[in-house]
């Protein structure tokens, strides 16, 4: 009779140690939830930093985890280094247009932001998240370990993992989260398909060293240089202050040799500047979403759950949002206060966000650098100036929504969530480029500065927070919360002016900063409300909503 191999026990197994998996480990670790993270790479990959932009929503998530400054310290482009995108005929050629304060990168104070965006290569993001993870005592990171198999039953998930030296470990957890990228082993093992389409276009990213290049052009600092000429059109920018550059352009040039890549980079620069190609990466845009985000006790997030084109910078940031949402729900399940439907609501909330991001990226993709090319752009004199002015007008029409995304980023709202108590109160909507603060349930809590350096978000609890705007709620809130084991903090703001701004006397804010309910508290059944926001009222609040199917071995939360 074979004796089963012993296994290590934990609460959550995280597969994948990129920005998304690392963020989930931080969200769980901040709540003292035991988790084991498996990542095959011993160190971050420095050769293909596709993610370069952390938007304000991601940065405020990192702030609440106490690691925003870790991210900024690790970035090789300091905060405030540039907030500009430049369009030109080449890096050393004619300027076409400059767009300032793009992607909310500006260091000019903005009361809507607790944290501005940060330009930071993916390898440096991972370095920061890995280093700060050492402060999480409940997290065990296994670098150099690869997932081989998954088994799940009514009570948990068991994985088999192997190291590069052939050694093997078995780990048993209550839940598993697959953040293992576009070729997700977890997704394949669960038999979950992705639906959508690919794009016939092919693109190349090259990483190269070019000492002195920053001083060799007169376009000024920019996070992106969009190059528009008839020889090769694409994008480029610096990864650090020491002239390590990236460049992206359509198609694999010729036979893919280094010399061909060098020629393409020279076309972007506008001269045969000496460069050393460090790495190349060929890819095609894909617009895909997993058919399900959950199978039993296993979940998908990040690129394992959705793939979208990079224009607008939504990919990694969308995955970080997944981690913030799934993290508090897994913590609730492990801690015992989650309702039976809470974990199913992860898919109900986050899958529509993936479709939303893909639709926005596809719109941005309709006009790329090559679509801006026209005869005469590189001409000197008045005729060239007129041609460039025409191109600049097209850039402003077609690229503004891609460069100014604060409304898209901060105005995201869960519009059909079983966990949200909706009302018929004011619900002003944001456009892609204009953020309209609103406390409409399902949306992100608007930010306020309560004093010098004192953010409203800094005062929120790890669980739910009842924000009291002038009035004081009764003791029934604590009673109902304690009966359910639900963590609830009060934040009393004696600011009568905020009642009009916030639109209610009370706000119930979730652990992920989204508003679950607002109101006056009159004739409110607090116990019923708390049951709904923790996933106990699905049948009465979400009729007609799809329920994720699970495998025969799967078990409910």
Image: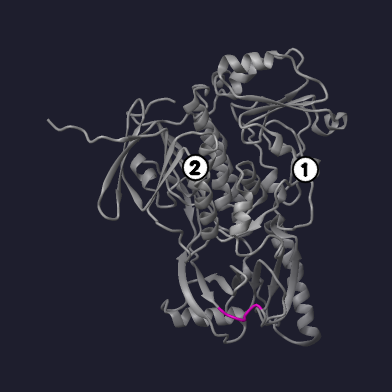
Q: Position of residue 191 (x, y in %)?
A: 35, 41
Q: Position of residue 251 (x, y in %)?
A: 49, 71
Q: Secondary structure at mark 1?
A: loop
In this rendering, the label closer to the viewer, 2 or 1: 2
Answer with the quarter of the image where residue 496 lies: top right
Q: Secondary structure at mark 2?
A: helix
Tag 1: Cα neighbours inside 10 Å, few (<14), some, or many (≥20)?
A: some
Above-or-below relation of 176 to 530: below
Looking at the image, which residue is at 50% across and 71% down? 206
Q: Which mark is residue 248?
A: none
Q: Is residue 4 left or right of residue 114?
A: left
Q: Quadrant of the C terminus?
A: top left
Identify the mark nearer the N-term, 2 or 1: 2
Q: Is residue 65 left or right of residue 385?
A: left
Q: Can residue 546 be seen from the camera position used here? A: no
Answer with the quarter of the image where residue 226 lies: bottom right
Q: Position of residue 10 (x, y in %)?
A: 39, 34
Answer with the quarter of the image where residue 498 lies: top right
Residue of label 1: 436
Tag 2: Cα neighbours inside 10 Å, few (<14), some, or many (≥20)?
A: many
Camera-nearest residue between 204 and 181: 181
Above-or-below relation of 177 to 279: above
Q: Quadrant of the N terminus?
A: top left
Q: Can residue 448 be seen from the camera position used here? A: yes
Magenta-drawn stretch, dominant element (helix, strand or loop): loop
Tell me where the magenta segment starts and ends, as one range.
Answer: 210-214
Q: Is residue 168 left or right of residue 211?
A: left
Q: Is residue 232 magenta?
A: no
Looking at the image, which residue is at 45% across and 50% down? 17
Residue of label 2: 25
Q: Position of residue 433 (x, y in %)?
A: 73, 52
Q: Is residue 387 left or right of residue 323?
A: right
């Amino acid at each position: 009779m074979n004796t089963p191999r012993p296994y290590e026990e934990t609460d959550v197994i995280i597969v994948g140690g990129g920005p998304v998996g690392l963020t989930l480990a931080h969200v769980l670790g901040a709540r003292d939830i035991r988790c084991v993270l498996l990542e095959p790479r011993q160190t971050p990959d420095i050769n293909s930093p596709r993610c370069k932009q952390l938007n304000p929503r991601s940065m405020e998530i990192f702030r609440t985890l106490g690691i925003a400054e870790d991210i900024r310290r690790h970035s090789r482009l300091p905060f405030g280094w540039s907030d500009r995108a430049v369009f030109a005929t080449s890096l050393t050629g004619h300027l076409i247009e400059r767009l300032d304060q793009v992607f909310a990168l500006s260091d000019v104070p903005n009361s809507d932001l607790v944290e501005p965006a940060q330009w930071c290569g993916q390898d440096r993001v991972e370095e920061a998240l890995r280093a700060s993870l050492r402060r999480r005592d409940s997290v065990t990171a296994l670098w150099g370990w690869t997932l081989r198999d998954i088994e799940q039953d009514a009570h948990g998930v068991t994985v088999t993992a192997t190291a590069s030296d052939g050694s093997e470990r078995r780990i048993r957890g209550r839940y598993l989260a697959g953040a293992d990228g576009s070729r997700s082993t977890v997704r394949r093992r669960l038999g979950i398909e992705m639906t959508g389409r690919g794009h016939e276009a092919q693109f190349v990213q090259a990483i190269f060293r070019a000492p002195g290049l920053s001083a060799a052009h007169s376009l000024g600092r920019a996070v992106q240089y969009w190059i528009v000429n008839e020889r090769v059109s694409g994008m480029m920018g610096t990864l650090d202050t020491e002239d390590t550059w990236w460049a992206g352009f359509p198609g694999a040039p010729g036979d893919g040799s280094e010399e061909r890549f060098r020629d393409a980079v020279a076309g972007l620069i506008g001269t045969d500047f000496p460069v050393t190609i460090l790495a190349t990466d060929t890819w095609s845009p894909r617009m895909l979403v997993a058919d399900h985000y959950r199978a039993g006790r296993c979940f998908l997030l990040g690129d394992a759950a959705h793939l979208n084109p990079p224009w607008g910078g939504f990919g990694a940031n969308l995955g970080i949002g997944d981690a913030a949402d799934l993290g508090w729900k897994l913590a609730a399940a492990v801690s015992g206060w989650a309702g039976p439907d809470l974990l199913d609501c992860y898919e109900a909330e986050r899958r529509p966000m993936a479709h939303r991001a893909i639709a926005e990226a596809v719109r941005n993709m309709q006009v790329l650098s090559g679509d801006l090319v026209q005869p005469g752009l590189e001409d000197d004199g008045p005729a060239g100036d007129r041609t460039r002015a025409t191109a600049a007008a097209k850039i402003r029409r077609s690229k503004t929504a891609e460069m100014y995304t604060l409304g898209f980023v901060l105005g995201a709202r869960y519009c059909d969530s079983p966990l949200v108590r909706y009302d018929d109160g004011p619900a002003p909507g944001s456009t892609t480029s204009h953020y309209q603060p609103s406390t409409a349930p399902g949306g992100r809590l608007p930010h306020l500065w309560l004093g010098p350096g004192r953010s409203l978000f800094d005062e929120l609890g790890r669980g739910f927070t009842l924000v009291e705007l002038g009035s004081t709620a009764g003791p029934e809130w604590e009673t109902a919360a304690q009966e359910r084991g639900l963590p609830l903090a009060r934040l009393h703001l004696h600011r009568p002016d905020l009642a009009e701004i916030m639109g209610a006397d009370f706000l119930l804010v979730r652990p992920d900063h989204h508003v679950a309910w607002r109101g006056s508290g009159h004739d409110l059944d607090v116990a019923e409300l708390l049951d709904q926001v923790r996933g106990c009222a699905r049948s009465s609040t979400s009729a007609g909503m799809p329920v994720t199917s699970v495998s025969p071995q799967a078990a409910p939360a």
